[in-house]
Image (spheres, rainbow, N blue to C red):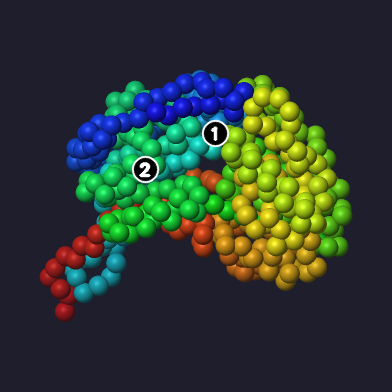
Amino acid sequence: MFTAINPATGEVIHQYKTLQLQELDLAIEDSLTSFKSWRKTSFEERATVLNQVADLMIEDQEALARLMTLEMGKPIKEARAEIQKAALCARHYAEHGATYLAPKTLESDASISYVQHLPLGPVLGILPWNAPFWLAFRFCAPALMAGNTCLMKHDAHVPACAEAIAKLFEKAGHPSVMQNLRIHNEQVAHVLEHEAVCAVSLTGSSWAGSQVASLAAKHIKPAVMELGGSDPSLVLADADIEKAASTLALSRIINAGQSCIAAKRIIVDSSVYDDFIAAFKPHLANLTMGDPAAEETQIGPIARADLRETLDRQVTMTIAQGARCLLGGEIPEGKGFFYPPTLLVDVTPSMQAACEETFGPIAVVMKASSEEEALSIANDTPYGLAASIWTADTQKARRMASEIEAGQIAINGIVKSDPRLPSGGIKKSGYGRELGPHGIMEFVNFQQVWVGPAES
C-alpha cells in the first residue's frame, strides 16, 4: 500500500494499492507487446502522441500542479512551472527527435556504410518525489521518441502524480507505452530481471543508484544514473556580487532546496566574502514560508518528516563544528514538516554540511583565499553533478570550467536542466546523460550497416 501524507499538515491524504506479482508481470508483458507495434511507428506518429500529451498537460495544468502541492509540498507557482516545463520537454523531442536520431553515414570500404539508431524495448524508469512530472518526462519523452516503451516506477509518496502521468497517455490513446508500476523498492529487482525489460534509468540517491546499477550490470542491461550532488558555486573577486547573491539564493531555495542541482556549497573569494554574505542574507531572510497552496508562498514544507530530521542533524552538527548560523537553524513549531531558510557561514570542508548532500533550504558559505583554493574546495567532494562560476572574466571562467569535476557548469547564471542540453554527472553523481541530443541516444541500438560490394 502506498500512503501519501500531506507534508504541510502531516495528515494522510490517500492510499493506493500496490501491484501483485501477477499484475506486475502482466504490465511488463503489455509493455513488450506495445513495443512491438510502437517501434514500427514513424517519428511523425510518435511526435503526434507527445504533442497531444503536452496539450493535455497544459489543459489540466492547475489540477496537475495541485497534486504536487498536496503530495510533496511544492509551492503552487513552482508546481505550475513544472507542468509547463514537462510539456516543453515532450514538445522538444517531438520536434527534434527525428533529427537527433537520423542515420549517420560513415566512410569505409563499403559502397555505403552508416549507423542507424534503433529502439531497444521496454525501459524501466525509477523516479523520485521532488519533481514528479518533470523527471517523468525527462525520462520518457526521449525514450518514447526513440521508439521504446516505458515502465514508470515512481516514488511511493507521490502516487496520485504517478497515476495522473499514466492517465495522460491513456487519454492520448496509448496507455501501454507509458505504464505506472505501483511497486515497492523491493520489487525493482524482479522488473530488472525480467527478460522483456531492456534498460533502466534512475534518478535518486547514490546508494539507490549503486544498488540498481549493480543489478543492471549483473543482467547486462544499459543504465543511466542521475544521482546526488553537492554542487559548488564559485564567487570570484570580480563577480557581480548582487547578481550572484540573488541568483544563488533562488538556486538554493527552489522546491525548498530539495533539488540535486541546487547551489549547495557557495565558495567565495576572501576579498568579497563579507560583501557577499551581506548581499546574500536578505534574499533568504525575506522569503515567505507557509502553505504551499497559497500564491504568496515561496518556501513550502520538506517532503517528509525523516528528511527534515536529517536536515536538522546536519545543521546542528555543522554549528557544533564551528560554523556560524546567521538565519534559521531550528525546527519551527506547528503542523507539517517545515524547515526555515538557514544560512551557515564560515563552513569548512570537513564540516557536516559540506561533507554530505543537503536536501533542503540550507545555504552553506565557505571562504577561499584564492581561485586555486576555490577550485580545490569545489572538487573536494565525492559528487560531480553541476557547478557555477561567477566572475566578470568569462574567458577565465571557461578555462576554470575544465578544471571542475562536474557534468554541468553554468557561468554567471543559475544551474538548471534544459531539454535542449545534456544533463548528468560524474563520480558518485552517476553516469550517462539525459536531455538534449545526448539523452535520446542512451537507450538505442547503434546499428552499423555495411552495404557491399566493397570498393576496391
Q: Residue at x 86, y 48 (%)?
A: 278
Q: Residue furthest bottom?
A: 456
Where is residue 198 drawn, in percent x and y? 27, 50
Residue 451, label in figure: none
Looking at the picture, tell me which residue is in the foreground, 311 or 410.
311
Marks 1/2: CA–CA distance? 29 Å
Q: Which mark is residue 186?
A: 2
Q: Residue at x 34, y 23 (%)?
A: 171
**Is any part of residue 236 visible from this angle?**
no
Q: Which quadrant holds residue 52?
A: top left
* Mark 2 neighbour class, 10 Å CA radius: few under 14, some 14 to 19, many 20 or more: few
- Quarter of the image with the C terminus is bottom left
Please report whichever mark, 1 or 2, sits nearer to the chain's N-terminal start. 1
The amino acid marked with disc number 2 is Glu
Which quadrant, please, contains the N terminus? Answer: top left
Q: Nearer the viewer, residue 115 or 122?
A: 122
User: Of tags 1 and 2, which is closer to the observer?
Assistant: 2
